[in-house]
Image (cartoon, rainbow, N blue to C red):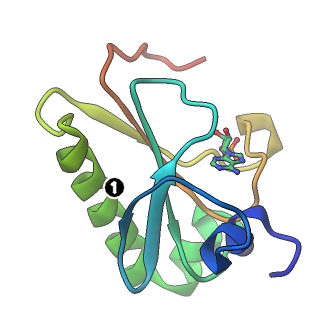
Amino acid sequence: MTDCLFCKIIAGDIPAKVVRETDRTLAFRDINPQAPTHVLVIPKGHHRDVAALAATDAELLAALLLEAHEVAAAEGVAETGYRVVFNTGPQAGQTVFHVHAHVLGGRDLRWPPG
Ligand code: AMP
Ligand code: ZN
């Protein structure tokens, strides 16, 4: 999608601090980190949110979640604990409508989230 920020990152038109890449996914650091580890994991194909991805390609969603774990392991937070968040819809705080898993860790995370 031409007007999608994350599609532009995938295309290399906007720079990002890439931490991992597979043929179908890209993981890069959030520009406004909310924890010592804050990485976004996205599919290279455009889907507006996690529900759309689940309905269209459940296997890619599974690959995205496995990648989220690989990011956590590479960041050294897999054992201490990490959170995977899919903000879905405006009231949940979704601002970029290209599905992305937030991988957050490296500090105590409050529950319930704000
Ligand atoms: P959400 O609010 O769940 O849609 O998450 C969007 C996330 O994208 C936010 O945490 C932003 O800080 C992050 N973000 C926005 N622009 C960029 C960018 N150019 N590079 C990396 N992360 C970004
Ligand atoms: Zn997109």
Return the x and y of residue 43 as percentages of the image width and height: 52, 74
User: Mark 1 — residue?
Assistant: 68
Q: Residue at x 34, y 29 (%)?
A: 105
User: In terms of image quadrants, where is residue 64?
Assistant: bottom left
Q: Residue at x 18, y 47 (%)?
A: 73
Answer few, some or many: residues within 10 Å of disc 1's Cα (few below 14, many 20 plus, some between 14 and 19): many
Q: Is residue 3 left or right of residue 61?
A: right
Q: Amino acid at mark 1?
A: Ala
Q: Nearer the viewer, residue 34 or 19?
A: 19
Q: Residue at x 17, y 37 (%)?
A: 76
User: In terms of image quadrants, where is residue 6?
Assistant: bottom right
User: In terms of image quadrants, where is residue 32?
Assistant: top right
Quadrant position of ligand 2: bottom right
Which quarter of the rendering shows the N terminus?
bottom right
**Height in image: 107 above or below 88?**
above
Q: Nearer the viewer, residue 52 or 74?
A: 74
Return the x and y of residue 104 as percentages of the image width and height: 40, 34
Return the x and y of residue 72 as percentages of the image width and height: 26, 45
Indicate if the residue with disc 1 has its beta carbon within 8 Å of ligand 1.
Answer: no
Return the x and y of residue 3 as percentages of the image width and height: 88, 72
Q: Nearer the viewer, residue 53 or 71?
A: 71
